[in-house]
Image: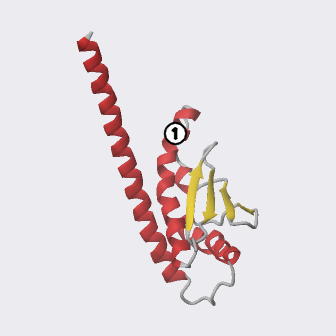
Amino acid sequence: MAERLARELALNEKASDDDEIRESTFFRLESIGYRVGQGLAERFSRDRPRFTDNLDVIKFLCKDLWMILFRKQVDNLKTNHRGVYVLTDNSFRPFARMSTASRSEATAMAQVFLWFPCGVIRGALSNMGIATTVQAETSELPGATFQIKTVQPRP
């Protein structure tokens, strides 16, 4: 019985180590994307007039920066006009050549490829003065959906 418990404990520790490694990898990918997004926003918004509101900044992201990154514009932009924006790309370029042997496996594997673009979006918006959180998901390849929530500064 002790041997069985020790084996289970070892398996649980290994799983937690894998989770730590996975989380640190995701954090690193998002951090690299954040820095890239800051640089892109700085470089490509330099010659433009100041944006008047958040929606103009998001439109710049969807049209201009997305074109630079993925050679196409975002397919759909939705907002609730209260600080939540949803960007939909029906043919997200990093997923274009991804194998879809098993849909559930492919969708799970595709999640890894969404951390870098989340960082790029967050970095670009941060550079233009909007603090955000960005979440991404994919339900059917090669599409991707990014949800951007603006963070209101605390008084």
The percent coordinates of residue 89 (x first, y second) are: 65, 57
Point 59% across, 68% down: residue: 66
Point 56% across, 79% down: residue: 128
- Work out whether residue 28 or residue 93 is closer to the camera in this orientation and state it: 28
The image quadrant where one finds the N terminus is top left
Please say if 113 is above or below 139.
below
User: In which quadrant of the rendered view does residue 8 lie?
Assistant: top left
The percent coordinates of residue 25 (x first, y second) are: 37, 51
User: In which quadrant of the rendered view does residue 4 lie?
Assistant: top left
The percent coordinates of residue 55 (x first, y second) are: 70, 74
**Label 1's element?**
helix
User: In which quadrant of the rendered view does residue 85 lie?
Assistant: bottom right
The image quadrant where one finds the C terminus is bottom right
Task: Looking at this view, name the residue that lies furthest to the top.
Answer: 1
Point 64% across, 76% down: residue: 57
In this figure, which residue is indicated by the disc labeled 1?
108
- Work out whether residue 119 or residue 76 is closer to the camera in this orientation and state it: 119
- Work out whether residue 35 or residue 133 is closer to the camera in this orientation and state it: 133
The percent coordinates of residue 104 (x first, y second) are: 56, 33
Residue 23 in the figure: left or right of residue 79: left
Please say if 147 is above or below 121.
above
